[in-house]
Amino acid sequence: MEQDNNYQINVSWQQKAATWLQSMKNELLIDKIFYTYCFISTAVIYLCSLYLDFPIDYSFTTYLETLMQALYVTGLSWCIYYYFYLILRKEKQPAKRFIRKLKHLIFPLHRPVSVFVSMMALNLIFSNHTFLKSLIPIINPFKWDLTFANIDTLLHFGVAPWELTHALFSNAWSSLALNVAYNAWFFCMWGILIFFLIYKKYPLVRQQFLLTFALSWMILGVFFATLLSSAGPCYVELITGDELFAPLMKTLEAQSQYLTNVDAGQLWALPTQQYLWDEYIANANGIGSGISAMPSLHVSIAVLMALSIYRLNKTIGYFAYAFAVIIQIGSVHLAWHYAIDGYLATLLTVMLWKIVGWALRRSASYPERSE
């Protein structure tokens, strides 16, 4: 009798394990194209780093610790927010409701495991991009900066775009506001990534976002960035000796000093630009390292966020498009980019979004909305 019970228990656990593994498999297969792209591209890049004599070492885990910390902080912040939200709503049993919600997010276990695997894939995307971005001036030295500066002036009727932005946003406080928005881009990108990794009610737009996101870092951030190798206005004098953007840099430095003097912080773009320059000189492969202006990935991802959000909610989408415009303005105003960097990034991102959407619809694997 005891043996029969043990046998039934073993069979029961085996069935549960088999069911869980099947659920896990089904969950991961939802993003099979995304994962396949990440792991194949990583394998190719890693093999190239082994057999080609690069002065920069490749790392699989450049962003892993940062992503795990960000995920932890995001989860903790959500828990605090949701618990106080329940209290403010005067929920009769907030703790019980909170635990029920937490269980819904964690169980079945294939949900958090899927998010963890996606974090690994994102780490590879960012690590690959940083490694390859650091190699751009080695593969194709910066030579397009003055050309893009001249094109900018031509496109804007004989006036440099940064002169236009500084005429419209002429004081230190407006520059600070643009810098805050520019830095907020990181948090917005992280937020929408987490949203699409977890929220699977609209499979088509979710896959379209994830694949366009992954491909943008490689196609725009590596291929076109290498082909059109340029450093950006803030580095022109350091690289070429040309003082074309010296007035812009002096203006930003004066504004940053003013903000420091009145205890309002500083323009964070300036120390960040110095950090990236130091990393460039040291041939480092660290978080965010690498110098590249054309095309602007800040603008590209901002446009991608707007495209995907608009598909889900048109009202919020309009705000997302407005944010993309602010990022475009900030990228020029803060000396990160030429205006044409953002224009080309917008064009390429929209094209990539359309192509990915067309391919997904033809595959008929992802419905507009899940049941």
Image: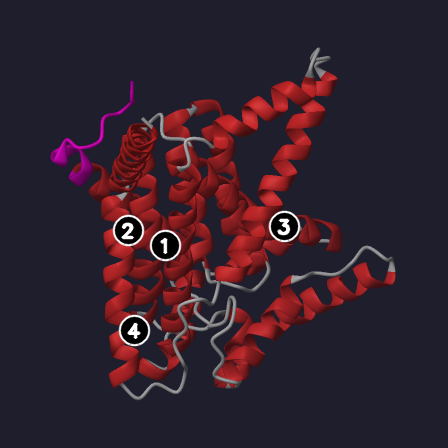
Question: Residue 243, can we see it?
Answer: no
Q: Decide which of 160, 148 is in the foreground and name it.
A: 148
- Membership of 369 in magenta stretch: yes
- Say whether residue 135 is left or right of residue 35: right
Label 3 with label 2: CB-CB less than 8 Å: no
Q: Nearer the viewer, mark 1 or mark 3?
A: 1
Relative image position of residue 250 (x, y in whole percent):
68, 71
Q: In this figure, which residue is indicated by the disc labeled 2?
A: 35
Crowd band around label 4 with a 10 angstrom C-alpha radius: few (<14), some (14–19), many (20+) = some
Give the mark nearest the N terminus, 2 or 4.
Answer: 2
Residue 297 higher or lower than 133, as above or below:
above
Q: Residue furthest left?
A: 362
Label 2 with label 1: CB-CB less than 8 Å: yes
Q: In this figure, which residue is indicated by the disc labeled 3?
A: 178
Q: In this figure, which residue is indicated by the disc labeled 4?
A: 46
- Say whether residue 180 is left or right of residue 316: right
Q: Residue at image x 71%, y 68%? A: 253
Determine whether the residue tagged by mark 1 lies in a helix, strand or loop: helix
Relative image position of residue 106 (x, y in whole percent):
48, 34
